[in-house]
């Protein structure tokens, strides 16, 4: 029974299959007049503006395909516009778009027009405008117009766009002559800016904390860049200071942590304090004139970019063997401070002044040579020596101190991290504070004379140093580099030509009755010619309680009378300090040459909190004070001032009263 059912089903299936095949043969039988059942045309190759394409369709029954050509379109299919030249407020721009066939189309972009809604204020007696603020403007791309209400727009005012964090670009007409203080401070989305050639000055803090600013173009028209103008521009990578700039203000590039290189032109004569503070990524400094570089007045370590860069390039060539040009007369403060890439120095006969900080921290230095004929300095044993005083001014890791050197100056070996051992000859009688500061590898110091040494710190009187300690080379090294590093060292073993005055004699000498005083001031790093007479007069005259200067003014010392002349009154304080030294007998030690020395004075009268007096030298002649010199350290932002007073005509000066 099952077999019969199976045969029946099989027969039915065969019949159905035969019928289906017959139907298919009938549907695609071209000879019988039947046509294919075609699907839709689909593009295989798209037509372009210059060439045809193809399309294809397929029969849904037999899958046979058919292809046909598509004619060229005859018109270009351009892509999106690409800006070739950005428009400015003065010139049209240009844009381009490209067809797939390679054909291009260019169009001009109209000149930019000023942003609407900015705030304006009249200046120059109503002759011109400056932009004083964002006003009602909402644009993020700001355009400063050439004119407003028929008058030129010539400036960007103080704090005009301060804190506009959405501002992404700024475009100027070339009428702008000055960008004032804080003009774009904290515009954190501003990425680039081009200063127009009409601008002559960039104010203080003008672009401070523009943290997205990666590039800025400063034209040759700019002659002054204010303090902290680019401080905190942490994305700024490189910058070229134009040759027209003569001074870079304090903190100008502070915290520009991405800055890797900078070009300093020959015209720069002054760089303010902390101008490059925290520019830790600086790798290269480029200059074109070594004489000009030596003459720059650097106001502190971080004002010199070499403090971070360690690489100074002269006309594109890295300096390692420094040969000072014969045109240089003086090497200023901090000129090559921390320049670790320096290996040798050659100083010509023309150099007669070298600041004590000029080569501090040049840890790679191995050779110091002074050319013959120099009237002030000479070299021996890779030491720079001041000839008149036999003072060792600068040493290096290969130094061998000559046996006639009497003084090792402040900072002489400072930062000399390659120095491992040194011998102090018997001729040395004074070692000034910080002479071996930062000599981290110095482990052996041999004192040829270990007896009679004393040290004086800024907070205590002089105390003796054990000769047995100094006889130990390792202990002596520790004392010089650490324990007593910031102290003044003095050796008394060879005796003095005169005995120390008594305390009574000391006090009597500071009465200054009927005496003339010639006095000058000097900021550290200035040339002797820069010494200025105090108060504009050439000298002071004392009669014990009254003081007069050569320009005819007169005061009672310590009185509270009104300020007649602010400058004179201010400087008069220094005379009060001179009297007060009479109370400081115990702070002074007698040096080998008969001069009295105090490392740091306890005097605090008429000074700001935190100010102090240090490096006080007092010279006696025939029982009278003949000269006083000291350094006044005030605000950390101001350079130390050296005051020098020379006394004469004791008992001979009589002031006629009244002096008006």
Image: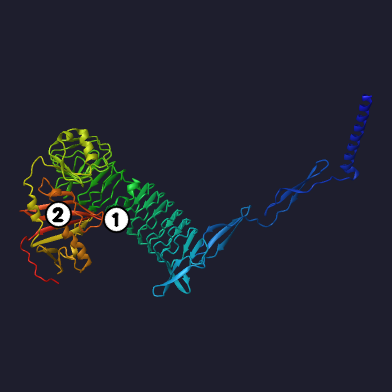
Residue 297: give x, y in percent of width and height: 28, 55
Q: Please name the residue that numbered disc 1 is placed on.
A: 637
Under circle 2, the secondary element is: helix
Residue 217: give x, y in percent of width and height: 42, 57
Q: Nearer the viewer, residue 82 or 650?
A: 650
- Side of 597 where 85 appears, left or right: right
Q: Earlier in the sequence, mark 1 or mark 2?
A: 2
Q: Nearer the viewer, residue 451 or 388?
A: 451
**Colouring scheme applied when the structure was drawn:** rainbow
Q: Is residue 136 above or below residue 261?
A: below
Residue 642 shows in the view: yes
Q: Nearer the viewer, mark 1 or mark 2?
A: 2
Which quadrant holds the C terminus?
Answer: bottom left
Under circle 1, the secondary element is: loop
Which quadrant holds the N terminus?
Answer: top right
Q: Is residue 130 above or below residue 499?
A: below
Q: How many marks?
A: 2
Which quadrant holds residue 570? bottom left
- Side of 239 where 363 appears, left or right: left
Q: Please name the residue that numbered disc 2 is placed on.
A: 581
Which quadrant holds residue 629? bottom left
Q: Nearer the viewer, residue 46 or 517?
A: 517
Q: Is residue 130 above or below residue 615?
A: below
């Amino acid at each position: 029974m099952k077999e019969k059912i199976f045969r029946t089903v099989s027969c039915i299936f065969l019949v159905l299959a035969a019928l289906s095949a017959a139907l298919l043969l009938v549907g695609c039988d071209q000879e019988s007049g039947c046509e294919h059942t075609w699907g839709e045309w689909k593009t295989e190759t798209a037509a372009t503006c210059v060439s045809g394409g193809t399309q294809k369709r397929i029969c849904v029954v037999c899958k046979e395909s058919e292809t046909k050509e598509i004619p060229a379109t005859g018109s270009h299919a351009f892509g999106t516009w690409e800006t070739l030249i950005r428009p400015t407020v003065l010139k049209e721009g240009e844009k381009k778009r490209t067809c797939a066939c390679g054909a291009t189309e260019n169009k001009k972009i109209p000149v930019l027009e000023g942003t609407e809604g900015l705030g304006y204020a009249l200046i120059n007696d109503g002759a011109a405008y400056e932009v004083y603020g964002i006003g009602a403007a909402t644009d993020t791309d700001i355009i400063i117009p050439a004119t407003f209400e028929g008058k030129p727009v010539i400036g960007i005012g103080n704090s005009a766009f301060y804190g506009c964090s959405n501002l992404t670009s700024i475009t100027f007409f070339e009428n702008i002559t000055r960008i004032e203080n804080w003009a774009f401070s904290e515009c954190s989305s501003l990425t680039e800016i081009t200063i127009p050639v009409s601008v002559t000055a960039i104010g203080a803090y003008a672009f401070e904390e523009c943290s997205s600013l990666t590039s800025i173009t400063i034209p040759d028209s700019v002659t002054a860049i204010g303090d902290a103008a680019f401080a905190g521009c942490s994305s700024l990578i490189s910058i070229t200071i134009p040759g027209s700039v003569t001074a870079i203000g304090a903190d100008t590039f502070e915290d520009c942590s991405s800055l890797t290189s900078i070009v300093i032109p020959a015209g720069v004569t002054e760089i303010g304090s902390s101008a490059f503070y925290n520019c830790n990524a600086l790798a290269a400094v480029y200059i074109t004139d070594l004489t000009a570089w030596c003459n720059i007045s650097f106001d502190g370590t971080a004002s010199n970019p070499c403090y971070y860069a360690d690489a100074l390039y002269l006309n594109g060539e890295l300096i390692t063997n420094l040969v000072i040009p014969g045109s240089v007369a003086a090497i200023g403060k901090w000129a090559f401070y921390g320049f670790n890439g320096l290996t040798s120095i050659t100083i010509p006969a023309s150099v007669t002044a070298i600041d004590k900080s000029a080569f501090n921290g040049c840890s790679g230095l191995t050779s110091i040579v002074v050319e013959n004929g120099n009237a002030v300095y000479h070299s021996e044993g890779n030491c720079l020596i001041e000839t008149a005083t036999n003072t060792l001014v600068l040493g290096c890791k290969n130094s061998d101190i000559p046996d006639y050197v009497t003084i090792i100056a402040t900072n002489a070996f400072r930062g000399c991290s390659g120095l491992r051992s040194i011998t102090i000859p018997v001729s040395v009688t004074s070692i000034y504070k910080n002479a071996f500061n930062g000599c981290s590898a110095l482990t052996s110091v041999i004192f040829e004379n270990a007896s009679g040494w004393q040290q004086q710190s800024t907070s205590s009187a002089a105390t003796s140093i054990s000769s047995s300690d100094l006889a130990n080379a390792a202990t002596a090294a520790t004392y010089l580099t650490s324990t007593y590093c910031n102290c003044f060292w003095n050796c008394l073993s060879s005796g003095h030509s005169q005995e120390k005055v008594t305390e009574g004699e000391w006090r009597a000498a500071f009465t200054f009755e009927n005496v003339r005083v010639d006095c000058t001031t000097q900021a550290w790093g200035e040339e002797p010619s820069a010494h200025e007479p105090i108060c504009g007069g050439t000298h002071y005259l004392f009669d014990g309680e009254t003081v007069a200067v050569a320009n005819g003014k007169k005061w009672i010392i310590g009185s509270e009378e009104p300020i007649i002349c602010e400058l004179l009154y201010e400087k008069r304080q220094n005379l009060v300090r001179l009297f007060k030294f009479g109370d400081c007998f115990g702070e002074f030690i007698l040096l080998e040459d008969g001069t009295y020395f105090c490392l740091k004075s306890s005097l605090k009268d008429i000074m700001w909190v935190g100010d102090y007096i240090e490096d006080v030298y007092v010279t006696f002649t025939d029982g009278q004070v003949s000269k006083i010199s000291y350094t006044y350290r005030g605000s950390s932002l101001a350079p130390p001032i050296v005051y020098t007073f020379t006394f004469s005509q004791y008992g001979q000066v009589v002031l006629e009263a009244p002096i008006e």
